[in-house]
Amino acid sequence: MSHADDTGADDGRARVAVIRNSFLHVLAGDRAVARRDGFGAGGTIARPPQISEPHDRRRIALIIEFAVLFIVAPLIMRVAVFEYGVPLFYALPPVLVLMIVLLFSDPSFNLKRELMRIVSFATMYSILILFAIGAMVVVILMANLMPERLFALAAERPGKWAKTMTLYPFTSVLAQELVYRVFFFHRYGPLFKSRWTLILANAFVFAFGHILFRNWIAIAATFLGGALFAWRYERTRSFWAVWIEHVLWGWLVFTVGLGVYFFTGVANPAW
């Protein structure tokens, strides 16, 4: 092969690399400015070193608190719901309220700062592109594996489907993202040194919180969703970005017929 051929091949590989990197950048969207204060939430303001880089005693205390809130509490709620018939609507709020109180009572957290982090055009484009690709995959899988469930709720009970689509962003996603992304990153971000460890830990506890539904589909789906939302939040530190993305995927779940796997079977008095 001549030198000209080698040069042409190198140029071709370079063009492919540029196209690939541009495509990956579009899929990923914007990245927030890197924080020196661990992996704090978007609303986290400057914290003293003993908080942002906790020593052994505080680290152990945070790990114990983390385990109680994200491991023990879901297990207790599961027992309450399925052994004693307590509606999830009653079992869940005490834990959510505790986490939100811990978040909002922390002087190093600023809600206004959190909510002012808007969604950039590049991030919104990334959210929509990934959702469009994922939605096509999910619909194709449902059509082949569970054709009897595909669009069943919307077709057979349109009123319930419409109510779910209307209330879900505000009764479910709002609280979940405040707890699993904002609270989690603000409170426990300093425990992590690697963003991928943080993302996987967040995905794990998000999935574990869904053991209430007692089926592997809900757990697998929320692990994947949790990883996506944690990755998005780590990049953007934008509550609104993960709220929008979570709403879209939740709407997809209830529309394509997977909502049956996210139901405890215990009547919810609010619905």
Image (cartoon, rainbow, N blue to C red):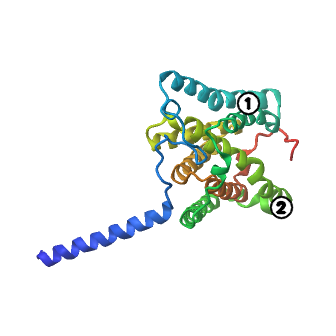
Q: Where is residue 252, by image quadrant?
A: bottom right
Instruction: Count numbered badges in the picture.
Output: 2
Q: Earlier in the sequence, mark 2 or mark 1?
A: 1
Left or right: residue 125 versus residue 16 is right
Crowd class of label 1 (few under 14; some 14 to 19; many from 20; radius 10 Å): many
Which residue is disc 1 drawn over? 77
Relative side of 19 to 80, left or right: left
**In 3D space, how far apart are the residues under numbered discs 2 and 1 (Cα atoms)?**
30 Å
Q: Left or right: 58 with respect to 105?
A: left
Residue 228 visible here: yes
Is 10 drawn above or below residue 82 in the view shown?
below
- Label 2 crowding class (10 Å Cα cut-off): few <14, some 14-19, many 20+? few
Is residue 99 depicted above or below 68 in this figure?
Answer: below
Per the rendering, the mark at residue 158 is 2
Q: Is residue 216 visible?
A: no
Image point 57% across, 60% down: which residue? 134
Residue 111: horizontal and vertical position, in percent? 67, 47
For image coordinates 74% across by 47% down, the residue present is: 172
What amino acid is labelled 2 in the image?
A: Pro
Residue 158, image quadrant: bottom right
- For label 1, the SS is helix
In the rendered image of this protein, does residue 64 appear above or below residue 257?
A: above
Q: Secondary structure at mark 2?
A: helix
Q: Which of pointers 2 and 1 indicates the residue nearer the eye?
A: 1
**Residue lying farthest right?**
269
